[in-house]
Image (cartoon, rainbow, N blue to C red):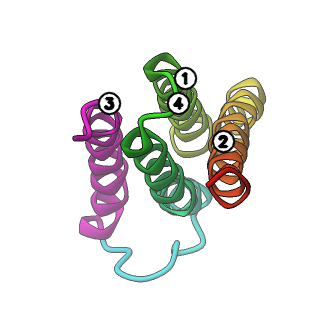
Amino acid sequence: MLTITPLYAGLLGLWFLLLSIHVIRFRWAGISLGDGGRPEVNRAIRGHGNFAEYVPLVLLLMALLETGGVIAPWVIHLIGLMLLIGRVLHAIALSFTQRWMPGRIGGMVLTFAALTLASLLCLWRGVAALVLP
């Protein structure tokens, strides 16, 4: 049974909701499609989209690792924390500020670290299952 991944899925889901509301506010203000040529709307849209591009895959990888029972729970928490902190930093930097490069860079480094670690561990589990029956 999954117990760790749902924690991070729930927290990230709430953050995604906040990012969605941030975009919707611009829609209610009259920009129904696109960014209306406004950089702040473009940033909000990209922050929302960027989140949607990375988070589902990492959560899926986490769930696969957690259900296998081979990976220590603290490693799955580490992946979840890196993803959560990375996505929050990146979204704040991209969606809510004009130019906070440390947040964008730190957010992407943490997100890529979570994606890389989860991917390599899934790959290791898959190869081990083939080699060690």
**Pair 3/2: label in front:** 2
The answer for how far apart the CA atoms under marks 2 and 1 are is 10 Å
Q: Tell me: residue 30, above or below residue 6.
A: below
The answer for how far apart the CA atoms under marks 2 and 4 are is 8 Å
CB atoms of marks 4 and 1 within 8 Å: yes
Q: Which residue is mark 4?
A: 71
Label 2 neighbour load within 10 Å: few <14, some 14-19, many 20+: some
Of the numbered discs 2 and 1, the one sitting upstream in the chain is 1
Of the numbered discs 1 and 3, the one sitting upstream in the chain is 3
Label drawn at residue 121:
2
Q: Amino acid at mark 2?
A: Leu
Tell me which corner region of the image, top left, top right, bottom left or bottom right, holds residue 110.
top right
Q: Amino acid at mark 4?
A: Ile
Q: Which residues are magenta?
A: 1-29
Q: Amino acid at mark 3?
A: Ile
CB atoms of marks 2 and 1 within 8 Å: yes
Q: Amino acid at mark 1?
A: Val
Left or right of 3? Residue 82 is right
x and y, in percent, of residue 36 in the image: 52, 75
Label 3 neighbour load within 10 Å: few <14, some 14-19, many 20+: some
Label 4 neighbour load within 10 Å: few <14, some 14-19, many 20+: some
Name the main secondary structure of what is drawn in magenta: helix
Q: Which residue is mark 3?
A: 4
Of the numbered discs 3 and 2, the one sitting upstream in the chain is 3
Helix, strand or loop at mark 3:
loop
Look at the image and tell me in which quarter the N terminus lies: top left
The answer for how far apart the CA atoms under marks 1 and 3 are is 10 Å
CB atoms of marks 2 and 4 within 8 Å: yes
Helix, strand or loop at mark 4:
loop
